[in-house]
Amino acid sequence: MSEVIRLTTPLTDEDILKLKAGDNVLITGVIYTGRDAAHKRMIEALEKGEELPFDVKGQVIYYVGPSPARPGRPVGAAGPTTSYRMNPYAPKLIALGLKGMIGKGKMSDEVKECCQKYKAVYFGAVGGCGALLSQRIKKAEVIAYEDLGPEAVRRLEVEDFPVIVVYDAHGGDLEEMGVKQYRVEE
Amino acid sequence: MRVIDVSEITEAIAKLCIEANYNLPDDVYEALKEAYEKEKSPVGKAVLSMILENAELAKQGIAPICQDCGLAVIFMEIGQDVHFTGGSLKEAIYEGVRKGYKEGYLRKSTCHPFTRANVGDNTPPVIHYDIVPGDKVRIVVAPKGGGSENMSMVTMLKPADGLEGVIETVVNRVKEAGGNPCPPIIVGVGVGGTFERSAFLAKKALLRPVGKPNPDVELAKVEKEILERINKLGIGPMGWGGTVTALAVHFEMEPVHIASLPCAININCHVARHKEIII
């Protein structure tokens, strides 16, 4: 396993360029949540020339819809959702300066190309680990689209949030590398 | 004849919804521990170690195992000598889901197909009724996450495609799904009856204790063969490369129409939740 890299948000081009597919990263700072419904609204807002709920420059969006927080806790279970559903929206946000997405599964070639072109990274978090990941979230606050319930946009404060680099800004792809290494040809 | 007040069903369902979302079944936990021992990729091993730690944390009640607390899939096996009183059985089941998802701080994930407006109480559940001999009621609650359900499929193969065609279809489906359904997965395969019957069989296959082979020796062999082929794909935990892509393949089969070979594949993520009670 590679050594752990610690990053603090917002992220710079310099932060991004040093990352390679397969790197283990611990993220600290503010990140934002958004799933399908929130992305759809954000892109519609852009098309209408309206402002986004937050400035995406240098930021990280976490594809998650948490479960309700238990009393005394900032957030409920909060693991990643499947990222391909954000394929139609991610390129536009990356072009506006978004530096990172956190999710699970593959994204499109277009997203991969955008990561190279605009210096961004697609991070993977371990799916189905909602309880464990929620412990790394210290604060959660809904900042937009409250009516979407679990899909509302939240501002999260995270500490040492564990992710792995899936697509880096140099064309590296962890899934491609990993599957190639362990595939047994028949 | 035995009389059961439907309020008892509501309470049972609510409890099962909560338990299923916080306590990973022992058989799944053991299969994941075994996977951790077997996995050759260091990244895959790290993933499995997190998954095991997460199950412990959820059991302590910090939060559900996964934020996707699922659409409530409920199997009702009702003894034919049971008579329900106190109201509508269906409404009692719905109320159990509402209560369980509210009191358990579980995510409500049902929404309008097009406006995507959340229903707000995780109803309606999917209910499968079966009338069986006796005077007992067996209830199984199996919350099903969207990520792995999205990777499932039903296809109508040609009879000439045969068993090999079914195996190819299953392996290809898992390959295409990659990391999306949160591997290591459990693969339910249903071949039988009509379009919807095969889908039901694939779903039901997921309820079997993980890795327990089909009692039919020939089908057990097929399960083993498919599992081996899947684990040669190299997808690994979360799709980041590795030797354990699936924990088990469960195959259920019934006779089909002479013109048909329906084949359903239902994929379950590693959070393979199901809890049951017999009343």
Image: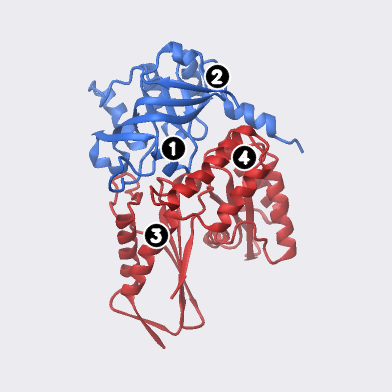
Q: State which tag comes first along the sequence, 3 or 4.
A: 3
Q: What is the crowding at mark 2: few (fewer than 14 residues within 10 Å), some, or many (at least 20)?
A: many
Quadrant occupied by the N terminus of chain B: bottom left
The vertical placement of A86 against B191, above or below, is above
Q: Residue at x 69, y 55 (%)?
A: B223
Distance CA(mark 4)–CA(mark 1):
21 Å
B200 or B142, nearer to the observer: B142
Distance CA(mark 3)–CA(mark 4):
31 Å
Q: Mark 4 or mark 1: which is in front? A: 1
Judged left or right of residue B254, residue A56 is: left
- Residues at marks 3 and 2 touching, judged by CB atoms closer than 8 Å: no
Q: Which mark is residue B269?
A: none
- Which residue position is annotated with label 1? A80
Chain B visual colour: red
Q: Position of residue B88 (x, y in %)?
A: 30, 73
Q: Mark 4 or mark 2: which is in front? A: 2
Q: Which mark is residue B17?
A: 3
The vertical placement of B156 against B181, above or below, is below
Distance CA(mark 4)–CA(mark 2):
25 Å
Looking at the rendered structure, the secondary structure element under dot 2 is: loop
| Label 2 chain ID | A
Q: What is the crowding at mark 1: few (fewer than 14 residues within 10 Å), some, or many (at least 20)?
A: many
Q: Which mark is residue B175?
A: 4
Q: Can marks 4 and 2 be said to lie on one chain?
A: no
Q: Which mark is residue A20?
A: 2
Amino acid type of the residue that numbered disc 4 sits on in the rendered structure: Lys
Amino acid type of the residue that numbered disc 2 sits on in the rendered structure: Lys
The blue-tinted chain is A
